[in-house]
Image (cartoon, rainbow, N blue to C red):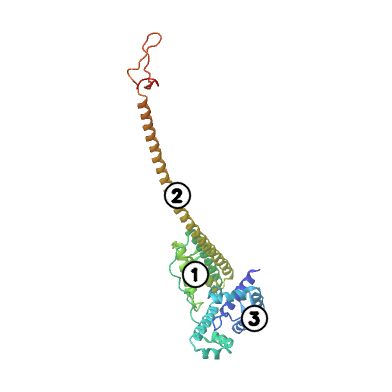
Amino acid sequence: MSTNNKAFDTYIRSVAASHALGTNGLFVGRKSLPKLCSAFLPDLIKLSESQHTKQEFLERLGELLKSGFAAELDKRTSGDTLLPLILWNTHLEAFSAAKKAVKAKKGKSPAENEGSEAGETTTTAAAQESIPSPSFTPPPPSPPATTIPFALQHAVLPPLQCLLEEACYSYIAKKFPHILLQKSWTLPQAAELNAYTREILAAQPCPFSDPTPLKNLNEIRHAAVHRIPLSEDKLYELVEVGGRAASMLGEWSALIKIQTLKTKVQKWSKEMTSAETERTKVRRKLELLKDRKRKIEAEITTLETLVEKTEKVDRKTMRRFKAEVEDHFAWSDEDKSDNEDGKPGRLVSRPRIFIVHPHSAN
């Protein structure tokens, strides 16, 4: 798929996600979604590097819905995770309007809800067109969590920062080339990300009604340069911020690369979660084995002590037995004999034997 086609698909997914939420809080369905998108779209869709008609949009949307995109939207609507797909500010405004419609319906009585079911599709589309454009603020970060390994953080933030510097440089080169001449910025690496965003936001007339996505880029630069430890959720949020800024600048090549980076971060997150679950199981098993080992070692020590005690008893018994035998066969000074040469012989131990003749007198 070419870069233009990828950018067009990204745009379609963004529009579809912004209109996928019905007033009942569920997915509007495969049949209603194209109608809602059609009411929202202009006749000619102008992207940075290509143009497409509304009919082309609807045909491609139908193909995506048949190939699994409808199931994805249904799942994301139920899980309230549509926001990562929405990358254009106008789409975010439509999505904001849809969420307000859901909250408004939840606040009505059951009778009022039933009366509004028939005109749900028309009301949703009208609400998205009539509500004034609110400024979009990224969702607040999750509560502080365990920081991710720095090696993984460093593998994501510097490349993201470079992509955004290239996107800003390209945007300024197209819209405000005199700035590059004044600053002598001859290539994207000539300035830092915060310098690019400062020049874009200071340009007159201001090119954006809501500069929030560009202002948020400074947080990416700050975290990358100062090596600030981040949680997994915060890292994912910064990647999303970069994607919104690239979308706002109309730099589709950078946007596609950031989307790929976001996909890799999601994959890494799942792998880390799976690895942590497995690690927890292994730790529990290891603790059980260590506990068993301690019990076995204690039992071994007890048995060794018992063996040592029995060996001491055996040695003591042998000493006593030896003493008794030696006492029974004690040497006698009276038992001396001469050898045949008349020389004194060695001491001989003889047992004392008493013989009683059977016919002797009593």
- Graded by Cα atoms within 10 Å as few (under 14), some (14 to 19) or many (20 or more), the crowding at tag 2 reads few
**Rendered-image quadrant of the N terminus:** bottom right
Q: Amino acid at mark 3?
A: Lys
Between residues 81 and 198, which one lies in front from this camera angle? 81
Mark yes or no: residue 54 visible.
yes
Quadrant of residue 350 within the rendered picture: top left
Q: Which residue is mark 2?
A: 296
Question: Are discs 2 and 3 less than 8 Å apart at CB?
Answer: no
Task: Give SS at disc 3.
Answer: helix
- Graded by Cα atoms within 10 Å as few (under 14), some (14 to 19) or many (20 or more), the crowding at tag 1 reads many
Above or below for 22 versus 330: below
The span from disc 2 to disc 1 (Cα, nearest Å) is 50 Å
- Graded by Cα atoms within 10 Å as few (under 14), some (14 to 19) or many (20 or more), the crowding at tag 3 reads some
Between residues 334 and 173, which one lies in front from this camera angle? 334
x, y percentage for residue 2? 65, 69
Q: Amino acid at mark 2?
A: Ile
Q: Nearer the viewer, mark 3 or mark 1?
A: 1
Above or below for 269 versus 21: above
Q: Which circle marks residue 54 in the picture? A: 3
Mark yes or no: residue 193 visible.
no
The span from disc 2 to disc 3 (Cα, nearest Å) is 76 Å
Among the two numbered marks 2 and 1 on one chain, the one whose residue lies closer to the N terminus: 1
Among the two numbered marks 2 and 3 on one chain, the one whose residue lies closer to the N terminus: 3
Q: Which residue is mark 1?
A: 237
Q: Amino acid at mark 1?
A: Glu
Q: Along the horizontal axis of the image, is 361 left or right of 242?
A: left
- Which residue corresponds to the image point at 39% horizontal and 33% vertical from the top-left? 318
The span from disc 3 to disc 1 (Cα, nearest Å) is 32 Å
Task: Give SS at disc 2.
Answer: helix
Task: Give SS at disc 1.
Answer: helix
x, y percentage for residue 173? 55, 70
Above or below for 164 versus 343: below
